[in-house]
Structure formats: C-alpha cells, structure tokens
C-alpha cells in the first residue's frame, strides 16, 4: 500500500454494528441489511473521498467449526459470480499483527445479495465455496471501488447450524435500526420462533463484544498506512 493520507470509509449493515466504533471519530455508512442500501452507502463513501474501505460488522457462519463470536479477517473475498477479490495485502498484514491475540480466521468469505437464512442454505453455500462466512456488504463495497484498498473485519453472529428466525429478517429498518413493531408482529404471528430469536440475540451480543474489542486495532492498522 502506498503511503498516503488515509480517509477511511466504513460500511456496516446495522446501527448496533456502528456503535462498536463509537468514539472513533469515523463516519460509518449503513446498508440496513439491504442490497440497495449497501449500494447507496458504498457509493456515498466513494463519492465522499474515501481512500481506504473497511467492511465492518457481523456475518453468518458457514464453516461448522466456527462458533458465534469468532473474529474474521479474510485474506480474500468470493464474489456472487464466483470470482475472487483479494483484500489489500499490506493492510491485511498490519491488521493481522495487531489482532493476533484475538486469533482471527483468515480464510475466504463470500458475499451474497440475499440473506442466507437456513442451515441447509448455509451448508450448500459452504460446500460450493468453502468460505468461512457470508455477508451482504463486503462484495458491494468491493464492486463500488475495485481500485481502492479494501479490508474486511467481521464476526460470526449466527453459526452454520443456526437458522435465522423470521423476526430477524423483518426486524431491520432501512437506516439500520431495529424495527420493533416488525419484530413484535412476526413473533405474534409465529410465537414458536421465540427460543431461536433469544439464542440469536445472545450470539449477536457475544459477537458484538468481539467486534468492539477488534475495532481499535483495525482502525490503527488503517492509520499506519498514512505518513
């Protein structure tokens, strides 16, 4: 990576993910866990003069060996069309050094335009790609500015064997906040999902703690690329 002044553009899906960067001073663009939102947010980061792009937040686990809370620092990203995009090698190396005590997993992640919500769908995607996890923002960020340095820092929230309950899929507003009425309505229609929803909440809280702990070193790794 050339030594230039770093203007870091960060893309996440949810307000809860952005709060893990609270106090950093960096602006985070949010997708609201929607493809159109990710495209809009990524475009805003690039148009705003970002020189380096960070995909930051939670991910769905595909590898059965990875438990919720596992830190992911993939060396490459698999695109929905099957092509592979490497992250910036020098930036990744710095981040790996700083995050070493947290033992991040560096195997490839895969991007998708739609939520991978069932254990069967996760198993099929893992069999096809071998990717450790999946998210809905990283590939959009890579597509928005293929010539800019890219780093991906994600944490497994739901494991490979965990299905996302319906309330989790309808419970996010376009601004990345929780749609409490959407969650409540879904639970009232299908109360049997409550145990799965509670398990997902516990796993997401564990993942968020990992993400908060990793945020500082990740941001420091970007800053080290400046003069």
Image (cartoon, rainbow, N blue to C red):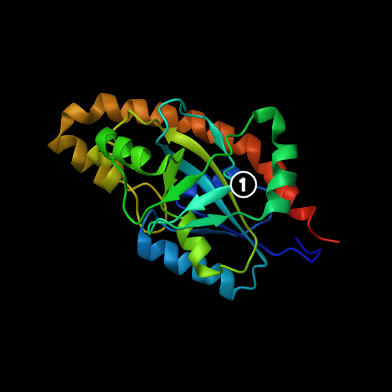
Residue 203: percent from left, percent from top = 43, 28
Residue 79: percent from left, percent from top = 43, 56
Residue 24 in view: no
Residue 48: percent from left, percent from top = 61, 73
- The N terminus: image quadrant: bottom right
Task: Say which residue appears at 64% left-offset and 34% top-offset.
Answer: 213
Residue 136 in view: yes
For this view, does 121 lie left or right of residue 134?
Answer: left
Quadrant position of residue 199: top left
- The C terminus: image quadrant: bottom right
Residue, disc 1? 21
Task: Say which residue appears at 38% left-offset and 59% top-offset.
Answer: 81
SS label for mark 1? helix
User: Residue extending furthest left?
Assistant: 189
User: Residue extending furthest right?
Assistant: 227
Establish if 113 lies above or below 220: below
Establish if 12 lies above or below 143: above
């Amino acid at each position: 990576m050339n030594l230039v002044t770093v203007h870091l553009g960060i893309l996440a899906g949810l307000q809860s993910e952005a709060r893990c960067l609270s106090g950093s001073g960096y602006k985070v663009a949010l997708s609201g866990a929607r493809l159109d939102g990710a495209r809009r947010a990524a475009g805003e980061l690039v148009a705003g003069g970002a020189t380096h792009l960070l995909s930051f937040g939670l991910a769905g686990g595909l590898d059965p060996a990875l438990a919720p809370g596992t830190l992911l620092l993939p060396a490459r990203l698999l695109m929905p069309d099957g092509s592979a995009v490497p992250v910036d090698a020098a930036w990744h190396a710095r981040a790996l050094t700083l995050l070493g005590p947290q033992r991040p997993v560096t195997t490839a992640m895969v991007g998708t335009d739609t939520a991978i919500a069932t254990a069967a769908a996760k198993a099929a995607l893992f069999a096809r790609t071998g990717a450790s996890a999946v998210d809905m923002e990283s590939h959009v960020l890579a597509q928005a500015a293929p010539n800019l340095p890219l780093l991906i820092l994600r944490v497994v929230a739901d494991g490979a064997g965990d299905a996302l309950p319906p309330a989790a899929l309808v419970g996010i507003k376009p601004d990345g906040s929780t749609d409490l009425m959407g969650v409540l309505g879904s639970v009232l229609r299908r109360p049997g999902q409550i145990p799965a929803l509670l398990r997902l909440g516990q796993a997401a809280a564990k993942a968020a703690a990992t993400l908060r702990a990793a945020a500082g070193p990740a941001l420091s790794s970007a800053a080290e690329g400046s003069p």
